[in-house]
Every structure is written in structure tokens, then in C-alpha cells.
Image: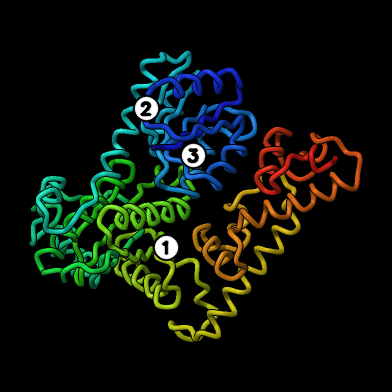
Amino acid sequence: MYSILVVDDEPLIVKGLTSLLQTSGLAIEHIYNAHSGYEALDYLRMEEIDLLITDIQMDAMTGIELMHQARLIKPWVQTIVISAHETFQYAQMAMRLGAKDYLIKPLNSEQFLDSVRNVLLKLERKDEGVLQPGEAELRESFRMEQPVADKTSLLNKLFGPAGEAADAIRQLRERYGVQLEGSYFSVLRLQLGKRKASGLMPLTSKDEELLQYAALNIVKELVGQEWSHIAFYSPNQELSILLQWNEVAYADMNVNKINLLDMIGRGLHFNIYKFLGIACVVGISQILRGTEFLGELYNQAAQAAKWHQEHQDHYVFYYGDFNWSAYTHQEPTREELHDQTNLIVERAKAYIDENFTQKGLTLHEVAQKNHVSPNYLSYLFKKITGFNLWEYVIKLRMELSKSLITGTDLRRYEIAERVGYESPEHFSKIFKKFYGISPSEMKK
């Protein structure tokens, strides 16, 4: 059974789509409604959403902005976009962000339900397809061509000395038609760990090969055609992904590249863990211009992944999250690490304390002020304070709203406005979820 979030600033459309879904006979457990992007983000933070259905043009936050934020919070959430405009640019941006369909208003009911059905069917197949290494089902599920050993060897040489890398680029182009199209590059290194299930027979070398093959298939499916990339085997049961952008793609201001890397890393870890049972550690490099820096990027990704030794309950690490200049050596001591992480959380907490009533406050904004990725900030904040970062924002808002309800004569809409909510209705839902009673019941 799945949960769907329907978002549109036109209440009649939300009501109509919800009614269609309720009577569709599809495997839907919960249907949540939001009338703005900000309301939608709260549902995404607090509920387990499988499918987001959003209008693309809304006043406070566009559907494109919502998709950006949704993929930061939960990269695996699927999306269907609805729009009153057949503008190619909108459709292109939506598809680049992973939208599974782009439907034009007025919606055809059958077409809409077919689109939802297709998304849910794919989710259902994945949920039922628990893959066991060595089993026939796994072999049947992955029909990707087995990587050619010589080609894989050349791809790994891209990260070697400059002369060797240049020769590998030439041979890849001449022998296999592999062209490095980017001016800008980043490297992700995936370290495939042990299976999560206990009580299993030890893996044979053939099983490990099969798991590496299956993980590479997941990488290709997830990264797919959305981003220009080359994925391949690397030594020590690793996978490498070389992401590349040409000048035009890199200049696209609609996509925050660091958030994109973070989102890809988290999506890869989530899906490999879910479908293969492998605890995969992902190290992510910065983005640099020029093929001469490929070796450095490869080393950065390895250095980032090493931080899993210090944060063993965290799996996705971005090189730029760590203030390397603060250390006199590459391996900081535990005391240095503790001081840096505490400072990041203290600054984030101070920023939230000062700005929690701001409408449209986002995790991205808080992370940007701290010069770290949203993923790493979320992890550190929970680890050190015991609170999920957005739970902390809601806690501050609810405590203030309670004092305003019990200590002033302000109306509900005035209190909602003061504590950072767009609508009184949405404020009331959050309040009741937090305190167990409505604002009016508390007033009495």
C-alpha cells in the first residue's frame, strides 16, 4: 500500500484528483493534500510519501522548486507533474529532475490514473523483488551487457598519472567510442560492503561478482539518461561514477550542483541497500574543470568515504563538507573532528533560533549558511542534538504558537502568520499533530 501527496494551489483540483484516486481501486493507503509547496514539504518531512503529484506553477513555491527540495529530503520519492502549460522548458526541467510524467490540464481522468498506476506498478515490482545473490531471479532481473575487462581497465586509468590518463582517453575514444564530453567533472566512489541480513551462508567470489554487477545496473538505471556519466567497476569491490557537465549544463543556475551530488549519492545508497542488502558507502568529490584533475577527484572521493570510519551510522560523504584547511594533516584527530562538528551544529541551531518564524525556511538555506551539504548537516544535527533538524524547527514554532494562543487574543490566522505558516489550516494540522489537540481546544 502506498502514500500519495497531491499538491496544487487550486483547492478544486486537489479535491478532484483526491476523489479520483480514492475511487481508483489502486493500492493506496493514504492521500495527503497540500495547497502550497511549503505545506507539501512538511508532509514530505513527516510522512512516508511514495508519489508526489504536483502542479508546476504555484504562487509561493513552484513545482520545480518543490521537486528540488523533495529530492533533497527523500531522493527516492517519485513525481508526476501537472500543468496548464505545454511549455517545453517546464517539461524539460521536470523530466531532468526525474518526473515520471508531465500531464497537461484539463486532465483526462483515464490518462491521469494510468500514469499513477504505472508509477505504482514499478514501485510494487521493486518492493516485491527482494534480490538474493546467486538466485535465478537476480540473474533474470539484470540483463545489462557484462562490462568488457579491457574497457574497464582503461576507464580506471583515467584516474592515473596525466600521461596515462591522456592515453586512456584516446584509446577509449578510438576502441569503444567513449567520449569525455564534459568540461567539468566529479567522481563518486561506491564501496560495496557486506549484506545486511544475518544467518546467511558466506558469499562466494561468484556471488560478489554478481552483486557488483547488480549494483552497477542499479547505478545505470538510477543515474540513467538524466545526467551525463560513465559508471564502471573499480578495484576492491568498488564502483566508480564519473559525472560530467559541458559548459552549458554547468552554467544552468536552476540546478544546485552540490545538492545534485548529494541527492545522487543518497539515492544510490538507499536503492542498493534496499534491493541488494548491501551497506554501500558513497564518497563524493568536488567538481573541478579539466580532465587533468580526474585523479585528484578520485582521491577526494576516497578521502570523503574514509569519514565513515568516524561516522559509522552514516554512509554518504561529500569531500567539500570537511574543512580540511583547519587541520595540519589529512587525518584529523577525534578531538578536532568533535570540535568541528559541534561548531557546525551550534551555528545551524543559532541560525534556526533566529529565523524559525521565517516563511519558506528550508534545510538548504540553513546548510548553505554553514557551507555544508544538507545531507551532512541533517545527520550531524540529529546525532548531536537528538532532534531531526526540521523537528527542531517545528518544536520552536509550536512552543511559540502555544504561548501566543494561551497568552494573547490573536486570531488563528495571525498566529499562523507569526510562526511561519502560509495557511491557518496547515498550521492547525501541524499543531494538532504536535500537541494532540487543536488550537481552539487549547484556547478553551
Q: Position of residue 160 (x, y in %)?
A: 23, 71
> Up-down: is 237 above or below 443?
below
Q: Which mark is residue 286?
A: 1
Q: Position of residue 196 (x, y in %)?
A: 29, 65
Discs 3/2, front: 2
Please name the residue shown 55% across and 69% down the image.
383
Label 1: how many Cα within 10 Å (few below 14, some 14–19, many 20+)? many
Q: Are marks 2 and 1 in contact (CB under 8 Å)?
A: no
Amino acid tagged 1: Gln
Q: Which mark is residue 26?
A: 2
> Up-down: is 414 above or below 112?
below
Please name the residue shown 40% across and 38% down the image.
78
For the residue pair 398 and 335, the one nearer the viewer reads as 398
> Up-down: is 32 above or below 402?
above
Label 2: how many Cα within 10 Å (few below 14, some 14–19, many 20+)? some
Between the residue at mark 3 and the residue at mark 1, the CA separation in whole angstroms equals 23 Å
